[in-house]
Image: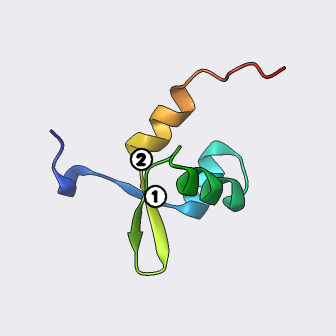
Amino acid sequence: MTELSDVRFLTVAEVAGLMRVSKMTVYRMVHSGELPAVRFGRSYRVPESAVTAALDRPISDVG
């Protein structure tokens, strides 16, 4: 198991830049539970491993 000191947390803006989506899209993903996050005060931090996992998931075909 990874220790908390080994986990790298990213801001919503950093996640949006990596995923090439808007910050609002990241907030929607956090609130829907699609992307796990930790709340620090009034801001959210997302584990880098969760972003990597989200980017590695296959995109479902809609329609």
Residue at x 64%, y 55% (from the top left corner):
28
Locate residue 43 relative to residue 8 in the image: left or right.
right
Q: Which residue is mark 2?
A: 48
Which residue, given by chain and number where applicable, does mark 1 sit on?
10
Secondary structure of the residue carrying tag 2 is helix
Give the x, y percent position of residue 7.
Answer: 28, 51
Q: Earlier in the sequence, mark 2 or mark 1?
A: 1
Give the CA distance from mark 2 to mark 1.
Answer: 6 Å
Tell me the amino acid under the disc marked 2.
Answer: Glu
Q: Residues within 10 Å of mark 2 (few under 14, many from 20)?
A: some
Q: Specify the label residue 43 is tagged with.
A: none
| Colouring rule applied to residues | rainbow
Front position in the image: 20 or 39: 39
Q: Quadrant of the N terminus?
A: top left
Q: Quadrant of residue 55?
A: top right
Q: Are marks 2 and 1 in contact (CB under 8 Å)?
A: yes
